Image: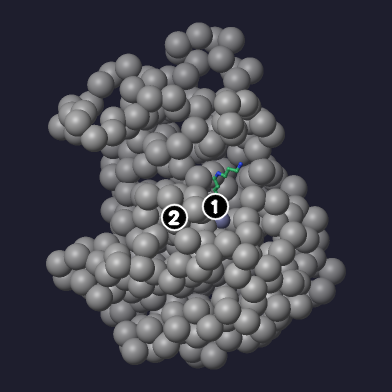
Amino acid sequence: MLIFHNPVHDQHAGRQEMFRGKLVPCHETPARLEYVMDALRQRGIGELRAPSAPDMELVKRVHTPRYVDFLARAWQDWLALDPTNAELDILPSVWPVRGFRHDIEPTNFAARLGLFSFDSGCPITAGTWTAATAGAACAIDAARAVTGTGGPRVAMALTRPPGHHAGADFFGGYCFLNNAALAAQALRDAGAARVAILDVDYHHGNGTQSIFYERGDVLTVSVHGDPTTEYPFFLGYADEAGEGAGFGANLNLPLPAGTDFATWTQALQQGLSAIAAFKADALVIALGVDTYEGDPISKFKLKSAHYLEVGRALASLGLPTVFTMEGGYAVADVGVNVANVLEGFGG
Ligand code: OKP
Ligand code: ZN
C-alpha cells in the first residue's frame, strides 16, 4: 500500500475553537497524524511517499475558484486588518442565513469569512493553506497511483486537516479542501466511469454529499451519528437521496449515539451492498476513527480490534481504493486504530 503523507501538515495547528461560549483548545491537532505515522512505521505497514505539487486545476473544479482564491489569500487579508492579528487564529462570527441575500459578495473580511464557512470551530492559521493544499496533493496522488498501470490496488492520503465537511465553497468542521472529493474526481478523470465514496467517520460527510448531490457518476454513502443530535446537525438524514441526475446516488445511514460495533457493522454492510449494486469502478474511503469508544467528541462504541474487521469488510468489495484521513480525536489511539484498518484491508 502506498501512503502519501503530508509533510507540512503541522503548519496547520489551530490554537482554539469556539465551544459553549468559550475558546477551547482544538481537538484536531498535529499529534494525531504523528501517532498514525508511528504506528505504521512500527508495524511496517505501507510505503511512505511525499506528494507532488497540487493540481490546482483539479482543485478548482471540485471547489469554486472564488473559494479557493479566498482561502489562498485569507491569512494576508487577516494581517492587513491589523498586523497584531498574527498572534490570533481566524474564526468566523457572522453568516448569511435564511432571509439574507446570496447574490452579493461583501468585501468586508469578516463578512467574506462567513460567506465561505458554516461554523466557528474551524480556525484558519498562517499555515492552513500550505497544509491543506499539500493534503489535496496527497489525495490526488493516491487516486492516480491506484489507476496507473501496474500500480497498487490501494493507496492512502495520510493528511490533516481533514476534508469531508468542506463543500465546493465553504470550510467548517476542521475541513478546508475536500480530500475525498478530490480523490474521487481524480479517479473519474483517470478513467473510472463510476466512483463510490464511503464515509465511515462518526460525523456525516456533508461537504462530500453536497459536492456530488446532483451527479449520478459518484455515489456518496455515509454511516454516521444521527444529525438530530450529532454534528453537523443540518444534513445527513436518511431521506437525502440525491437530486436530478444524482437521484439515488446518495445514501445516508444515520445511527443513534451509543451505537455499538454489532449495529454499526450492519449499516456498513448496507453501504457496501449499495456500492456493489452501483457497480462502482473505484472506491474512496473517508476514514475517520472517531467511531472509537474512547473518542472525546463522539458517541459510538467501536473498540480497537474492531478496526481490523472494518478493514477486511472494506477490502471485500475488491475495488481500487483510496483512503483519506478524516477524524479521530482520542489522539494516542488514532494510530493503532488507523493501522488496524489498513492491516485488515491488506495489500
Ligand atoms: C470533524 B470530523 C466539539 C465540537 C465539535 C466539530 C466537529 C468536527 C468533526 N466540542 N465540532 O468529522 O471528525
Ligand atoms: Zn468526525
Q: Is residue 125 left or right of residue 47?
A: left
Around disc 2, counting alpha carbons within 10 Å, would you say few (fewer than 14), some (14 to 19), or many (20 or more)?
some
Amino acid type of the residue that numbered disc 2 sits on in the rendered structure: Thr
Can the viewer see residue 69? no
Residue 139: percent from the left, percent from the top?
A: 50, 61
Residue named by callout 1 = 162
Of labels 2 and 1, the one closer to you? 2
Which quarter of the rendering shows the C terminus? Answer: bottom right
What is the secondary structure assignment of the residue under circle 2? loop
Q: Residue at x 50, y 90 (%)?
A: 318
Q: Residue at x 33, y 38 (%)?
A: 67
Q: CA distance from mark 2 to mark 1?
A: 23 Å
Which quarter of the rendering shows the N terminus? Answer: bottom right
The answer to whether mark 2 and mark 1 are in CB contact below 8 A is no
Disc 1 residue: CB within 8 Å of ligand 1? yes
- The label shown at residue 228 is 2
**Residue 127: which quarter of the image?**
top right
Q: Is residue 270 left or right of residue 262?
A: left
Vertical relation: 251 (above or below) 90:
below
Q: Residue at x 68, y 68 (%)?
A: 301
Amino acid type of the residue that numbered disc 1 sits on in the rendered structure: Pro
Residue 89: percent from the left, percent from the top?
A: 57, 25
* Between discs 2 and 1, the one toward the N terminus: 1
Q: Is residue 241 left or right of residue 132?
A: left
Vertical relation: 162 (above or below) 315:
above
